[in-house]
Image (spheres, grey):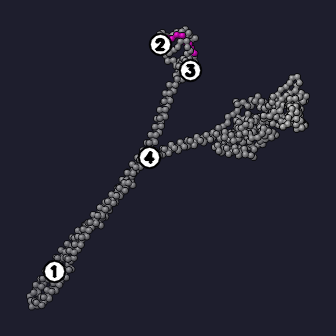
Amino acid sequence: MQEFSVKEISQILSGILKNAFPEMVAVTGEISQVSKTNSSGHIYFTLKEGDSVLNATFFKYYHAANNFMPKLGDKVKVYGEIKTYDKSSSYQINVKKIEYDSEGLLWKQFEEMKKKLFAEGLFDESRKRPIPKYPYKVAVLTALTGAVIRDFIVTTKNEKGRYLIDVWNIPVQNIENAQVIADTILKAGSHTERYDVIIVMRGGGSMEDLAVFNQEVVARAAAASKVPLISAVGHETDFTIIDYVSDYRAATPTAAAAYLSASYKEAQQLLEKYIFVLNKNTANMLEKKNQQLDMAALKLESKSPQHQLIKLSHKIAGFNNIIESIMNKRLYELNKKLVKYESVVAASNPNNLMEAYKVRIVNSRKSLLTNMAVKLSSYSQKEIMYRKNIKTAVSNKLEKKAARLEFYSNKISLFNPAKKLSSYMYKLDIIEKSLLRAVREKYAASNSLLKEYFRRLDQYMIDYRYNKNADVSILESKLRLLDPQNVIERGYAVVTQNDKIVSSVDKVEMETELTITLKDGVVSAYPDKIYSSNENSVDADNIEKILK
C-alpha cells in the first residue's frame, strides 16, 4: 500500500485536472447561490446540474465586458478555465464569458412574455368564454401528419362525441411559422356561424419544439379569436403562452377530445338509462295488458263464436245420430211391412187367380163335355148364366183387389223415408242459420264491450294522473303557505335568542341579545324589561329603551 501526504494528494489531483482540462472549456448548467462582493466587484455563483455542482467566479473585468448579470435559476453556458487550489484541495471555473443556452434563452423569453401579457390582462378569467357543452362543428388546427389528429379522432369516437371535425393544416414548430399559425387562428376564428370551438394542438416535445406557441403574435391571435379556443399543446407538464390566453387549456390533444365529448357521453349514458327505464316500463305495462287481455280472452273464449259453434256442432252431431237411428229403425220396419204387403199382393194377383180359374174352367168343360155331353143342350142355358155370373164375380173381385192395392200404395207413400229426411234437413238448415246469426251478433256485442273496456281503462289512467297532479299542486301551495319566509314577507318577524326561536316572553333572558329577523333585514336588541300580554301596552319611550 502506498502512503501519501495531504499535500501530495492535493498536488496529484491538481495535476490530473490540469491534464484533463488544459484549455478553456464550455460548461452548461443552472445558476444557483449567486453572491457579489462589494469591494472587488467579482461575482461568485454555483453551476448546478441535478445533484452535481461546480463553483464559478466571474471576475469584474469579464462581466463588465460581457454585460451579463447572472440570475438565480438561469440556464446558461459559461466559457472559462478550470483552476485548482492546492491549499484548499478545491477546484472551480474562472468564467470569461456567459450566454444563455438555447433552452435557457427560450425560458427567459417565455417568462418575459408571460409577465407582459399578464400585465395587459390577456390571462384574466373574466375575458375567457365558456366552451359550448354540445358543439356541432369543431375546427382543429394541427399538422395533418403524425399521430395527434388520429388520436383525437379515435378518442372522439370512443368518448361518444357527435361533433363534426374540420382539420386546418398548420406547421407546429419553428418560430418562423408563428405568423402562419396566427393567421390561421384569426381566419378560423372569424367563422362564428360555422364553428362552435377551435382547438390548437400538437404532441409533446422540448421547449424549443413548443417555442412557436410562446410567440406574442400567436397569443394575441388566440385572444382575438371570435370563436372559443382550446389549447392542447404538448403533454400535461408542458405549458405555453397560448395555454394562458386560450379559453380552456387541455393537458393533451386526447384530453381535449375527451373534454368536448364529455357532455355527449353523459347525454348518451342518460339516454341509454332513459331507454332502459322506458323499455322496462313498457315491458311491465305490456305484461299487465297481456294479463288483462288473457283474462278477457278466457272470459270471451267461453262465449266466443268458435266455442259456441263447436258446442252447436256437437249438438247437431248428436241430433244427426238420433235422427239417423230413428230413420234406420223406421226404414227397417217399413221395409219389413213392404215385404209382407208384397207377398199378400202377390198372392192376390188377379192374373194368378184367372189362371187358376181358367184351369178350373178347362177342367170343368172337359168334364162336362165328357160326362155331360148328353146334358149339353139342357145345360147350355145354365152355361150362359154361369159364364155371366163368373165374369161378373171376377170383375168385382178384380175391382176390390185393385182398390185395396191402391189403398196400400197410398199408405206406404205416406211413410216414405225420403220425404221425412227432406223435411228434417230443411228444419236443420233453418236451425243452423239461426244459430250462426245469433253467434255473429253475440261476437259483435262482445268485441264492442271489450273496446269500451279498454277505452274506460285509458280514461281512468288519464283521470288518475290528472287528479294526482292536482293533489301535488295543492300540497305545494300549502307548503308555500307554511314557509316561514312567506310568513315574514306578510309583515311578521322571527325572534331568536341563543339560536333558539322565542315563542313566549317567559323564554326571554334579560340583557341577552335578541335577533329579530324581518323581510328586509335583521334587528339586534337587548331587553331590560318584559311586558306580558295582560299588562298595558308599551309606549314609544319604553320601546326605544328596550331597543337601545
Q: Which residue is mark 2?
A: 533
Point out residue 503 in the picture as x, y percentages from the top left corner. Answer: 49, 18
Q: Marks 4 and 2, how far apart in space?
A: 68 Å
Point out residue 486 in the picture as x, y percentages from the top left corner. Answer: 53, 23
Point out residue 308 in the picture as x, y percentages from the top left corner. Answer: 36, 54
Q: Nearer the viewer, residue 484 or 348?
A: 484
Is residue 540 in view from this perspective? no
Q: Nearer the viewer, residue 531 or 211?
A: 211
- How many C-alpha atoms fall within 10 Å of the one at disc 4: few (<14), some, or many (≥20)? few
Q: Marks 3 and 1, how far apart in space?
A: 148 Å
Q: Which residue is mark 4?
A: 291
The local secondary structure at tag 2 comes to loop
| Precedes in sequence: disc 2 or disc 1 | 1
Residue at the location (37% across, 56% down)?
A: 309
Q: Quadrant of the N terminus?
A: top right
For marks 3 and 4, give the one nearer the viewer: 4
For marks 3 and 2, give the one nearer the viewer: 2
The local secondary structure at tag 4 comes to helix
Three-letter residue code for mark 4: Gln
**Residue 391: image tag:** 1
The region drawn magenta spans 524-533
Q: Is residue 532 magenta?
A: yes
Q: Marks 1 and 4, how far apart in space?
A: 96 Å
- Residue furthest top as drawn: 541
Q: Is 12 placed left or right of 464 in the picture?
A: right
Q: Quadrant of the C terminus?
A: top right
Q: Are marks 3 and 1 in contact (CB under 8 Å)?
A: no
Three-letter residue code for mark 1: Lys
For marks 3 and 1, give the one nearer the viewer: 3
Three-letter residue code for mark 3: Lys
Q: Main secondary structure of the magenta part?
A: loop
